């Protein structure tokens, strides 16, 4: 491998521009979300926007360092990063600080490090390294199983914290596996499992069995009524029925507040003052912004703290209230362009590692944006994941910066095997 010494000339300016716009817009919204006339200085480190400014500066330093490091460093140390992330995830279970019922942070002086955020980056590196290795193919069950182990091992450790939101993000890597040749039936099986799980929450078990039975009968009728097809359909019914029973069991094992959030989402419960309070206030804030918004620092829902976690998981409420529908569309469009641009550049890479890693970046960003926006407008359950480059937090911002700029470096380096 030989790296072009003039790689800086090849750095994609569009990705960097969108990154800078999103980071600045995020900081402005954090400032608005926690604005206090008694603490109006942007350098006030006692306030979240003051700390976030330091995180932004730190993020820029990380970006510059990544662009200066030889790209072969990240390829050669992919498994080392992955191993380090596993060690940190294990360490947080032992020495981690408990915040809001989650043992997910390691206290380092006055700074809290969240290993789960960096585990996404490390897993993406390791997965790209493994899938680009010789002899690995999505046509082989051994390769598929190993890929799932790489993806879901850190996710299981994160579930133990317990941080359900961060753990679910790892499901986004299925999109990467599909791009690399994962059989479609596996993806559709996963989708069917989600549908069955939702049916189980809405309907009694015996009604779900009837629906599954009718579906099985339809499969037999549509296909040739050979013994093989009938046996396959019956086996599918048995597996689906077993999963249906198992999903009810797993739901019962969820924490009470997690069950309540799901029940509120699907309409089985209405609790505007309890579990559903956050989402209800979020929708009020976004809806009150109208078309053009109330104006910067003029958001009443935001200013008077009606929306909990408005600087972190619910930061998009500030965008909707103060910037309105137009501002919200602009921000969402920037995320869309960023993700599509990453996918476009991933396709032009000259080696498998860079292409796979690029799709991993796009998948993680897509999942975060989709779920975060979905939960603040009430379309998805509140699972607590940040909006990339927007939500308050050093670990989140630095991890996303690292994730993105390693790909920018890959694209600029033009390394071929």
Image (cartoon, grey):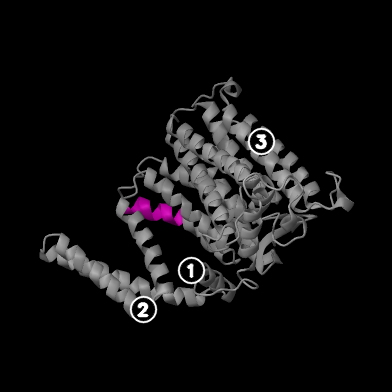
The stretch of residues the image draws in magenta is 141-150
Q: Where is residue 258 in the image (x, y as percent from the top left)?
A: 56, 71
Which residue in the protein does label 3 denote? 20
Between 192 and 394, the one lying in front of the other is: 192
Q: Mostly what secondary structure, the magenta segment?
A: helix
Dot 3 lies on which element?
A: helix
How far apart, in angstroms, are the residues tagged by discs 3 and 1?
A: 37 Å
Q: In this view, does 397 lie to the left or right of 170?
A: right
Residue 108 image-quadrant placement: bottom right
Mark 1 crowdedness (10 Å alpha carbons): few <14, some 14-19, many ≥20: some
Image label count = 3
Q: Nearer the viewer, residue 316 or 51?
A: 316
Please state if 189 lies on the left or on the right of 277 as rendered.
Answer: left
Which residue lies at the image location 74% right of the left edge and 45% below the top edge? 296
Mark 3 vs 1, N-terminal side: 3
Q: Mark 1 points at which residue?
A: 266
- Nearer to us of marks 1 and 2 is 1
Of pointers 1 and 2, the one earlier in the residue sequence: 2
Marks 2/3: CA–CA distance: 50 Å
Up/down of 11 relative to 87, above or below:
above
Alpha carbon distance from label 1 to label 2: 17 Å
- Residue 205: which disc? 2
Residue at image coords 38%, 79%: 204
From the top left corner, tell me how far across and down residue 262 is, in percent.
52, 69
Q: In this view, does 142 lie above or below 78?
A: below
Q: Which of the two marks, 3 or 1, is nearer to us in this view?
A: 1
- The tag earlier along the polypeptide, 2 or 3, is 3
Answer few, some or many: residues within 10 Å of disc 2's Cα (few below 14, many 20 plus, some between 14 and 19): some
Residue visible at 50% across and 34% down? 341
Q: Is residue 409 magenta?
A: no
Q: Which residue lies furthest to the right in this view?
A: 38
């Amino acid at each position: 491998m030989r790296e072009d010494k003039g790689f800086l000339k090849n750095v994609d300016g569009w990705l960097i521009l969108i990154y800078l716009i999103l980071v600045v817009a995020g900081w402005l919204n954090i400032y608005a979300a926690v604005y206090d006339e008694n603490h109006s200085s942007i350098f006030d480190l006692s306030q979240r926007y003051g700390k976030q400014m330091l995180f932004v500066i730190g993020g820029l330093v990380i970006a510059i360092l990544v662009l200066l490091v030889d790209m072969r460093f990240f390829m050669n140390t992919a498994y080392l990063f992955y191993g380090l992330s596993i060690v940190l995830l294990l360490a947080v279970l032992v020495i981690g600080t408990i915040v809001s019922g989650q043992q997910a942070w390691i206290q380092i002086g006055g700074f809290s490090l969240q290993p789960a955020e960096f585990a996404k980056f490390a897993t993406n590196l390791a997965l790209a390294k493994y899938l680009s290795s010789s002899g690995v193919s999505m046509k082989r069950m051994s390769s598929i199983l190993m890929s799932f182990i790489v993806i879901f091992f850190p996710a299981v450790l994160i579930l133990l914290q317990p941080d359900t939101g961060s753990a679910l993000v790892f499901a986004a890597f299925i999109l990467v596996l599909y791009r690399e040749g994962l059989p479609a039936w596996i993806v559709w099986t996963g989708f069917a499992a989600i549908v069955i799980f939702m049916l189980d929450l809405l309907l009694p078990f015996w009604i779900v069995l009837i629906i599954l039975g009718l579906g099985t009968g339809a499969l037999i009728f549509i296909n040739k009524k050979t013994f093989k097809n009938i046996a396959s359909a019956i086996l599918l019914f048995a597996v689906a029925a077993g999963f249906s029973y198992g999903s009810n069991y797993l739901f019962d094992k969820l924490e009470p507040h997690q069950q309540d959030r799901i029940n509120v989402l699907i309409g089985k419960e209405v609790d505007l003052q309890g579990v559903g309070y956050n989402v209800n206030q979020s929708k009020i804030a976004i809806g009150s912004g109208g078309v053009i918004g109330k104006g910067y620092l003029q958001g009443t829902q935001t200013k008077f703290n009606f929306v909990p976690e408005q600087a972190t998981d619910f930061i998009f409420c500030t965008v909707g209230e103060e910037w309105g529908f137009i501002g919200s569309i602009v921000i969402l469009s920037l995320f869309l362009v960023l993700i599509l641009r990453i996918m476009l550049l991933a396709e032009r890479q000259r080696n498998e590692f860079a292409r796979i890693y690029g799709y991993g970046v796009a998948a993680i960003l897509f999942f975060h944006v989709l779920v975060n926006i979905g939960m603040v407008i009430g379309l998805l359950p509140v699972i607590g994941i940040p909006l990339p480059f927007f939500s308050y937090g050093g670990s989140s911002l630095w991890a996303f910066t690292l994730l993105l700029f390693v790909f920018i470096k890959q694209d600029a380096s033009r390394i071929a095997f």
